[in-house]
Image (cartoon, helix red, strand yellow):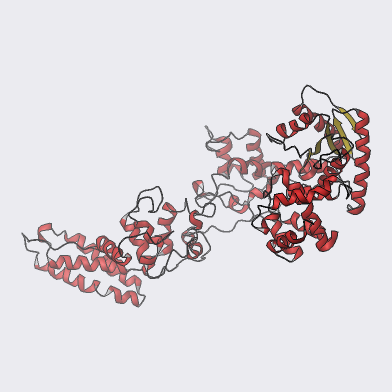
Amino acid sequence: MRTASLLTISKRLWFSLLLAFLTASAAAPCSAHAALPPESRRELAELTRELKGVPGLIKKKDVEAAKAIIAKADERVQALEIAEDEKDRTWTGCKAALDKAKYVLPVSFESEVAPILKTNCLRCHNEAQASANFRLDTYEAIGKGSRSGPVVFAGTPQRSLLALRLIHPDEKQRMPSGAEKLKDPEILTIVRWIEQGAPFDGEDKSAPIGDSLVEKKPPVQVVMATGSETVSFRKDVAPWLVNLCVGCHSGNNPRGNYSLTTFEQLLQGGPTGNTIVPGNPDGSYIVDLVLRQDPLKMPAGQGQLKLSQAKALETWIREGAHFDGTDPKAPIRTLVPTEAELEAARLAAMSDSEFEQRRTEQAEALWKRVSPKTTGNAFTSPDFYFYGTVDESRLKTLADSAQSHLAQLTTKYPLPEGQKPFRGRLIVFVTKDRFDYEEFNTVLMNNRRTPKVISGHSVINAGQETAYVAMHDTGDTSDTGADTALSATELLNSLVSQTFLTRDGAPLPDWLKLGFGTLEAGIPENSAFLKSLPVRATKSLATLNDPAKLFTEGTFSPGEVGDVGYLLVRFLMNQGGPQRFQQFLTALRGNPDAAAALQQVYGSPPAQLGQLFLRSGTR
């Protein structure tokens, strides 16, 4: 929120005008046509005298006595039923004293301010959606302010953006955004609260605003499952609760004032308190809603709950509504695995033979997507499943090379005992024609154009649900006059190295993956490819204006990143050897922020490492 353009006149003057308008007493009559009865005049004068004592009572914190005087004056002024032509200065003086007395009454944040904010402001300023980085859902959050700084200055509403935005003359700048301006009494309540020091009269500043006035229900008794139940809350009830119910029954304003966010809240029930009665499904209102009412009312406006699910809920309640999770205070959503987690569990439970069968079927299915009218040749080795348009003898030659290279990798970078590098083997697609390889990028990778310098790529994800490399058979000789080309064996070694590095599915940056692949591909130092690589990389680095961006994903194009990545990985290896490089990989797997991992392991900011690399890394 910016303050410079909020008002064109003095904020103090603006508020003076506002408060004068909101609290103005009735104007003195132009000319009275009837005299106010003497007894009424005397009573009004006495009320005025009593009302003038209200500020003193407030200072003494005798608020109840002050409220009693105001209530008495309000009642008597109403009862006197003074006609318009009888309202003289005695009446206007009493009315002014009454308005002033009401103005100085302490404003309750919880009972007066919070309802206004909850009704008008929380849709944009809550934990899930904090517009301008400003939350209004807790008193503590209000005190923290927005991205522009504090929004409430205790005692000075004319400096407080929370109040200023409510009266902004520009509808586009005024809050609530996209809604009607707040009523004047509501604005005045917030202004008075700030003017009085913006005090908090709740119990917990970090609790939802107005929480102290919500009737607290007795704590629920959570009974843990024994394993003898026929229905599991975690497996049979929680999944459909999360998918069909939690969307409406959660957040700051859950439907029906009934939240299902946690198991404890589920048992706590709604306003009636009998939503779930453990051991008594007939007395549980939720069973009526999902099973017995005609028509069924829940879930509202969503997919129909299956009869078997409603029956499972009924049985679960009859068996005591036991909990088979770990923390009844945690969101129920954490009990329900995502599709990715379910798939990971299914994969983890598969035997080696099952995974091998899955990989064979996967290879054929992927090939059919790319080339539905062509049947490829296949060759199987201990760790690879080769498939492609080259003949079987060629696949065998490449498979032997891949096995030999993988053995070297596992010797240099040992695996945990008993662990295989690839579950169910790694698929290797080999195409005789470059066009067929480019189809892999077009169909499976959604790449419309494949740079000519790219002849292969690898894909592997968490749990190795998918694990393959695709390559064009570039032949057995790399030095054919094209210094950007690798032989098929070198290319295959590079791809196997890349996949070996990322076998856990970690999202490592491309420069690291491709650079490691080239470094570990076994390419001769005197090859034309490696001799020309620094020259190619230097051209890519020529436009770099920030050394720290060397390590940022997306800095270089797909055709450049492999060359620069090779030099970067070689540079990092030289900074602390393979052991420190392994530490860097471990840090990256825990946090994919390359800059943070570099700082943590190498002890230098990325910009400093980048400068050192630029001075020495391309030689």
Please provide percent x and percent y for residue 608.
70, 64
Q: Compared to 377, does 554 lie above or below?
A: below
Left or right: 440, with 328 as reference point: right
Left or right: 533, with 66 as reference point: right
- Check the picture and name the quadrant holding the C terminus: bottom right
Q: Residue at x 52, y 36 (%)?
A: 301
Left or right: 347, with 207 as reference point: right
Along the line of sight, which residue is nearer the eye, 331 or 603? 603
- Check the picture and name the quadrant holding the N terminus: bottom left
Please provide percent x and percent y for residue 343.
75, 40
Please provide percent x and percent y for residue 311.
65, 37
Q: Compared to 454, does 3 lie above or below?
A: below
Picture mark count: 0
Along the line of sight, which residue is nearer the eye, 317 or 496? 496
Residue extending farthest to the front is 481
- Is residue 35 visible in the rendered structure shown here? yes
Quarter of image, res 601:
bottom right
Along the line of sight, which residue is nearer the eye, 423 or 476? 476
- Is residue 231 visible in the rendered structure shown here? no
Quarter of image, res 398:
top right
Please provide percent x and percent y for residue 558.
71, 43
Q: Compared to 322, does 103 lie above or below?
A: below
Q: Compared to 103, does 235 lie above or below?
A: above
Q: Residue at x 93, y 35 (%)?
A: 397
Along the line of sight, which residue is nearer the eye, 7 or 230? 7
Q: Residue at x 77, y 60 (%)?
A: 616
Residue extending farthest to the left is 33
